[in-house]
Image: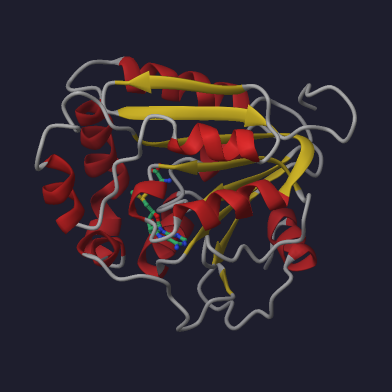
Amino acid sequence: MTNPAQRQVRDLLTTEILDDSQGFVDVLGDAVTGRSLSLSLMQNPMFAGFYERAWRPAFTRLFSLGGEATADVDRELVEHLGRPGERRILDVACGPGNYTARLGERLTGDGCCIGLDFSAPMLRQAVADNSGERVAYVRGDAHRLPFPDDSFDAVVCLAALYLIPDPKVVIAELMRVLQPGGEIAVFTTVRTRLSGLPGVQSVVGLTGLHIFGRHEITRQLQRAGIADVEQTITGQAQYVRAYKPRRGRDQKPR
Ligand SMILES: C[S@@+](CC[C@H](N)C(=O)[O-])C[C@H]1O[C@@H](n2cnc3c(N)ncnc32)[C@H](O)[C@@H]1O
């Protein structure tokens, strides 16, 4: 049985489906990009099992160094992006679907939220914990999104860019599949006084994590033609939000 969101995924995909027997469509097979301690952890079924309930809440607090700032911005972001409407949202590196389901639940009409991740254990967890009428999951690589240009109203990549081997390519892909006028939101690391201390990047780097320079992501978006890039720094993390320019028109969201 397929829900309306899963049917939309099949219509949208630009790549052959290799398997669909586990509640998500797999277009990746063995073609996984990158190896590191962090990426291996994401492939671990036990980690996938406690990620949403234990790891992510702790990590969110850690990013604010115990404060509430990250959680507050996060809540506002989900409220805004998941507002009612007939929009198509892509959640890149969705993990166990902890955002995918929340972004999809209030959409209307043919609106849907598609979660994409390269970890089969994460996606099995997503299907078990975060399924819904307007939600579908794809196993694919963020470096090569299996969707046509200009096909989403909003694209998010949360808590993932810092462990992805080639984040510049991924940001270019997020922009490619986003419709003109559509919204992009990224949550990731940022260099601060603390994370800029000598040795911190090297130690963190051993796990495969990357701490982004203060303007690394905003500048890439600006170079891609976006005038208004909003950056909110919450402790050791940043939210970057922007609208892809409409061709020759204003930048208001749909
Ligand atoms: C820390 S989890 C983030 C989950 C969720 N977005 C959140 O904010 O809690 C990072 C996810 O990125 C995924 N990931 C890492 N590299 C990827 C890639 N190249 N393509 C797709 N997913 C990737 C991992 O499998 C993992 O599920």
Q: Is residue 73 left or right of residue 54?
A: right
Q: In this view, does 151 lie above or below 29?
A: above
Q: In which quarter of the image is residue 3?
A: bottom right
Q: Position of residue 65 (x, y in %)?
A: 18, 23
Q: Which residue sits at x=66%, y=66%?
A: 146
Image side of residue 221 versus residue 2, left or right: left
Image quadrant where one finds the C terminus: top right
Toward the viewer: 8 or 39?
Answer: 39
Q: Is residue 182 above or below residue 210?
A: above
Is residue 107 positioned above or below 131 on the image?
above
Query: How far across and how far down the image is residue 129, in percent?
Result: 42, 51
Image x and y of residue 23, in percent: 54, 68
Indicate left or right for 49 with 136 as reference.
left
Using the rendered image of the protein, determine whether residue 156 is visible from the camera's viewpoint: yes
Count of numbered labels shown in the rendering: 0
Q: At 76% across and 29% down in the image, what residue appears? A: 85
For the N terminus, give its image quadrant.
bottom right
- Residue 64, picture quadrant: top left
Residue at 68% across / 25% down in the picture?
227
How is the rendered protein coloured? Answer: secondary structure
Left-right relation of 127 to 8: left
Quadrant observed for ligand 1 in the rendered image: bottom left
Q: Is residue 77 above or below residue 98?
A: above
Of residues 248 and 84, the one nearer the viewer is 248
Quarter of image, res 98: top left
Q: Is residue 82 visible?
A: no
Q: Where is residue 185 in the image (x, y as percent from the top left)?
A: 55, 34
List the single residue furthest toward the right. Answer: 248
